[in-house]
Amino acid sequence: MINDESDQFNPRDPRAADAGKPSKSEKRRAARQMAMQALYQRHMAGQSLNEIEAQFRVDNDFTSVDASYFHDILHGVPANQDKIDAALAPCLDLTIEELDPVELAVLRLSTWELLERIDVPYRVVINEGIELAKVYGSTDGHKFVNGVLDKLAPRLREVEVKAYKR
């Protein structure tokens, strides 16, 4: 890191050890990306969660991934799928079965976060869902995901949403 006094790199500066390492939010974003892909794979191929998780851990470098968060999402979404789908249904113009599989994976992941991970602010959940849909979804899939999550957040996080909008 740059030392304030000499403007030169000082390897003994405690900040130097963290230089180039991904932040917690970057590791969680990577975990969401992999978990969304894994959920999509489960939906399409019907593989077991343990098979999918093992495959992802072997085939991917997890040094920049919050592996625990990946595991929590991958196992938490299917374990709560009925609850997730029931929460989503009133916010959709389509049935769950009619949704694009990528957008369904993004919406289920985001809904799980809204329901189960109160430590993640609702605005972060929405933003991350939109970003996943932009990268992996159809051309305007992110707009659809945004609209659904904007309807869903006040239902699931009423107090938090009201506090933010004050």
Image (tube, rainbow, N blue to C red):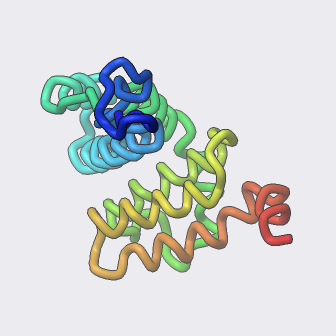
Direction from residue 38 to residue 69 in the image, left or right: right
Residue visible at 74% across and 65% down in the picture: 154
Residue visible at 36% across and 66% down in the picture: 133
Which quadrant would the N terminus be assigned to in this image?
top left
Residue visible at 47% across and 49% down in the picture: 109
Residue 113 vs 97, above or below: the answer is: above
Q: Quadrant of residue 166?
A: bottom right
Residue furthest toward the front? Answer: 6
Give the tally of numbered discs. Answer: 0
Direction from residue 139 to residue 31 in the image, left or right: right
Closest to the observer: 53 or 119?
Answer: 119
Residue 50, horizontal then vertical, whole percent: 30, 23
Q: Quadrant of residue 46?
A: top left
Closest to the observer: 89 or 161?
Answer: 161
Direction from residue 150 to residue 25 in the image, left or right: left
Residue visible at 17% across and 32% down in the picture: 60
Q: Quadrant of residue 56?
A: top left
Residue 118, horizontal then vertical, whole percent: 69, 42
Residue 71, horizontal then vertical, whole percent: 41, 28
Residue 99, horizontal then vertical, whole percent: 40, 68
Closest to the observer: 8 or 96?
Answer: 8
Residue furthest toward the top? Answer: 12
Residue 144 vs 20, above or below: the answer is: below
Residue 115 vs 70, above or below: the answer is: below
Residue furthest toward the left? Answer: 59
Direction from residue 142 to residue 45 in the image, left or right: left
